[in-house]
Structures are given as structure tokens and as C-alpha cells.
Image (tube, rainbow, N blue to C red):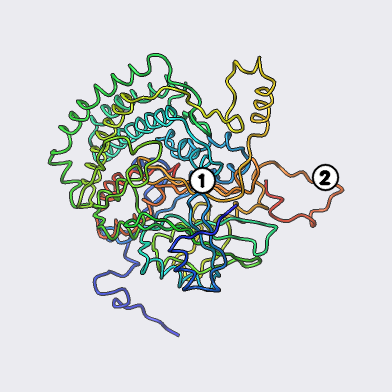
Amino acid sequence: METRITQEAFGPEHEPESEWMELNMGPQHPSTHGVLRVRLKLDGEIVRDADPDVGYLHTGFEKSFEDKTYTQGITFSDRMDYLAPPINNVGFVMAVEKLIGVEVPPRAQAIRVLMMELARIASHELWLGTAGLDLGVYSGFFYAWRDRELVLDLNEAYSGVRMMTSFTRVGGVAWDLPEGWIDQLQRFIDVMPKRIDDFEAMLTSNPIWRQRLEGIGVLSRDEAIETGVTGPMLRASGIDYDVRKAFPYCGYEQYDFQVALARNGDCYDRYRVRVQEMRESLKILQQALDRLPGGPWLTSDRKVALPPRAELSKSMEAVIHHFRLVSEGFKGPLGDVYAFVESPRGELGFYLVSDGTNKPYRMKVRPPSFCNLQPLKKMVQGVLVADVIAIMGSMDFILGDVDR
Amino acid sequence: MSVRPTDALVQRIGDRFKQALQESSDFRGDLSVVVEPGALMELARYLKEDEGFDYFLYATAVDWPARNPRFTLVWEVRSLANKTRIRIKTTATMPDPHAPSLTPVWPAANWHERETWDLFGIRFDGHPDLRRILMPDTWEGFPLRKDYVSFGEPVIFSDQKLEGLEPDAIRG
């Protein structure tokens, strides 16, 4: 039987699909920031459809968590979203702490806040640099990299590692702040506002920058909720939701800061929200530094935290605890919990199921980048190919976080 | 371990879904309800439209090989206005684990359910685009199942027969 495909079958405004060109953007493409492949269907220069193909960086972290004890799992957590490792560290241990019910001393909470806000600034700096680079702002990249380097120096001075800090422990943090660190941080806080001003002077009212971003990739309020986007993307669409304010953790309720908000939900608003967030993070850093509490930085509960080194030569009990914790770790009760933090990309959640052993039975990560990438298909329909770059840049997804 | 929640929301759900509501718990402040697969869609619609759970968080599954039904399916949603959160659970049995898809209610569930299909092999009925998402399209097996070996190379000695082994166990 002969069948004929008519123009009407595709709707009046569309050309027959066979006339569309299919273009692979990625997996190796500078603007995909990692390994993302997007199959674009092009009608001339106009994008008709897009199919993001993720998974190139899938390394099975969720499976690996099941083979490692809770303490060992910390090192996996920072390798997922490799641009904000301290925030992943904190999110992971918060899930474990919620499961076993451990109190975290105030000094540890404050150190966590310091490290997390530094990570937020570094991540936004990197985003500013690379998203600008995609759109031709070459000089911005160098400024952003220079400023991000200051945070990496602070990371290194505290944890010995520039990126994969793994600085948290269940019940606190691994080390106290080293000597001179606070002065180094204070210098950072002093120098940064001027640097953000410089950045804004270069971009915020730059006509080319605005032309490339304003009105592009608009996500309305309702669409933002429906598609489940989170973080700056949600706030750029006018929804006042920030985990730090809505469900304070690590003592965020003590600090005075604003949730950066915008209304239009376009790429330009996402840029403005992130820049504003950097300023707010600096405010939090200053307050946390001024009020830094003294005292221990790790819980004294010997069932979950290692005893101090000096105790080992004096106390048999400490040796036993040390041995037990290092060899098999601690056990969690039966149950499942969800703990979540505000990462630079949005709500990062850890759903932890425990079967009563010393390892997670199941560890599901709710990655903000994965949720933010989902509406890409809809957002690029009808835009020019060049705008796809601007839209993808404004989403700030990290493929390690998407694919895990 | 879990205590019976006195939460008003759970009571309303209990009144409405009587037998379909199999269990409810409030562990460490996380509210969860377990329902029969048949009532899942109705519960989802009720939660979204009448209780204001507008924001979808994640969907996943947990594999309990020794249990029957083997899989626990989990969806978690939040009400942005009320700042509350609820975890919806149901179960799926072997050999063909499947459950209704919640994408008609929360479109954001799309990729999360694809991921659950990809890693656990659970079909979601009514899902618009159920393809593998993280693993390659040609992949065999479902990596997050407990019988899927995550590391180590199985050794087969000459006197052992291949037939006795499960296909998943052969994969390194």
C-alpha cells in the first residue's frame, strides 16, 4: 500500500522533518564544559528540537558508595561536582549525621560555612570566566581565573589539596584552621568586592553582553517549577527559594544575607543572580569569620569520630575506638533519610538508605546540574544556534554532577 | 525504629486512601508513605492539586533481592509554599518490575525515571520517553541492581561450567 507523507502531517509552520539537518554539538565541544552531546535538529539556523545525550562521565559513584564505609565515602562525594567539592562533602556527611543522629560542634559548623561559601565564590568565578569565554569575553576569563586561584590557595592551606578537599568528617571537620589562615581569608574578603566591581564594570552594562543574553533562554516562573530547575536558575525566574534560607543548616540562620533574586528568567538574569550571590557569600564569610566560635571541631562521640592522636598513647579505650573506626567504621540504624544543601548550582540532595551495616545500602544523589539540564530541550526550541551556546552557558551545569 | 506519624497530612491521606496506604513513617523528620502501585497516580494527583506539592525532587529505587516484592520505588516532592516534603514509595516485583510513571503529574520526573529504568531496569508505564540515559543504549544489565558485580574479575576454572552462572555475574 502506498502511503504519502504530506506537508500537513508536520503542522503548517514546519517544514517536513527530512529537510531538517541533524547536528551533533559535542561530545567534544568547548561550550559543553565537559562531555555533553546535544543532538540538534536544525531548520536553517533555527533550532527545532534538541536531545541532550548525557552519561559520558558516568562513573557509577552511587554504586561505589555501596562498597565503602561512611567515612570512605567522603572522598567520592567531592569528585562528583568537582567545582564545589566542599559543598558536596558537607551534603554527604549531613546525610550520614542525620541518619545516625550526631551533634556537630559550633566551630565545625562555622568552618563548614567558610569552606562552602568560598567554594560558591570559586564556582561562580569559574562560571563567569567560562560562560563569558563562550561568548567571546576573553579577558574576563583571566580575571576570573586569577580570583578563583585565591580560593584554591585557601583550600590548599586548609586541607592540603586545591580542589578535592574531603575536609569533612561525620560529626565535624577533619582539622582545625591552620595558623595564618584567618588572615589570608581576611585579605581575600577585603580584595574581592573591588574585583567583582571590576568584573561588573566590564560586563553588566556592556551592550554586546546584554544583547547576547537579554531575552534569551527565558524560563517563566511556572516553567521553572514544572521542569524542576533549582538554584540560580530558579531564582532568576523569580522564585525565592534558597536552601540556606528556607531550611537553614550549619547555622546559616545566624547570618544576615539576602537571597539573590531576579524576575525575567533569561540568561542575563542568571548572570546577575550569580554575581549578586558572590557578594552575599562575601557578607556571610565576613560574619562567620567575625563570630568564629572556639572549642572542638569534631564531635567527642568516640563511636563515630577518631580520638585525638595524643590519647592513643595513654588510653586503651582510645586505641580500641581507633582500631574499630579505622578497620570497620561505624554502623547506621535501619532507615532512610534525605539531606540537602545549597550548592552553587542549586539543591544538592543525598538520599541515604541504610540496612544497619557500616556502609550505605543505597546512596542516591539528587544532582542539581542533572535537574537544570532537563529543560534544555524546551529552552532551545526556536532559537538560533549561537544562542544555544549562551543558554547552555547560563545553565552552569557540571557534567561530573550530571553523570555521577 | 519509625514512629507512627501524627502529622495531619498523613491522616488526610489515610482517610482518603484507606487500604491503598500500606505504611507511613516519620523517620528523622522525613515523612514517607507507602502505597499500592494501583493508587499511586491518584495519590500523586491529590498531593499536587489539593496539597500543593508542586516541586519535584527526585525519583529512584532501592533493590532488596531477598524481599518480595524486590524493588522499592521512591519519589520525593516538595511544596515550595508550605516548605514541606513527602516521600512516596511503592513496590515492584520481579520478573517484570514496573510501576506507573508520575511524569503526567510532575513533568520533571522524566529524566529521573529514565535514570531509574537505566540503572534498575524498572519500567514506568506511561512514560513519554523511556530510554537509557546514563549508560550507552547498547548496554546489557542494570548496574545498580545488587546482583550486578561492581568490581573484581570473576575467574572461571577449567572444571567449572559456564551454564551455572548468571549472566550478570560474568561481567567484570
Residue A222 occupies quadrant: bottom left
Q: Which mark is residue A330?
A: none
Viewer-nearest residue: A202 or A163: A163
Name the residue rendered at 45%, 23% in the picture: A295
Q: In the rendered view of the protein, which quadrant contains the C terminus of chain B?
A: top right
x then y, percent, for residue A120: 34, 35
x then y, percent, for residue A204: 16, 38
Say what secondary structure mark 1 lies in.
loop
**Residue position for label 1:** A58
Q: Horizontal placement of A53 versus B61: left or right?
A: left
Say what secondary structure mark 2 lies in.
loop
x then y, percent, for residue B11: 47, 66
Which class describes the residues within 10 Å of circle 2: few (<14), some (14-19), or many (20+)?
few
For the residue marked with disc 2, what is the amino acid?
Answer: Phe
Name the residue rendered at 48%, 51% in the picture: B29
| Residue occupying the far right of the picture | B159
**Residue position for label 2:** B157
Viewer-nearest residue: B110 or A365: A365
| Residue occupying the far bottom of the picture | A1
The vertical placement of B127 against A135, above or below, is below
Q: Are tags 2 and 1 found on a single chain? A: no
Residue A90 occupies quadrant: top left
x then y, percent, for residue A283: 26, 31
Marks 2 and 1, how far apart at CA? 32 Å
The chain ID associated with circle 1 is: A
The chain ID associated with circle 2 is: B
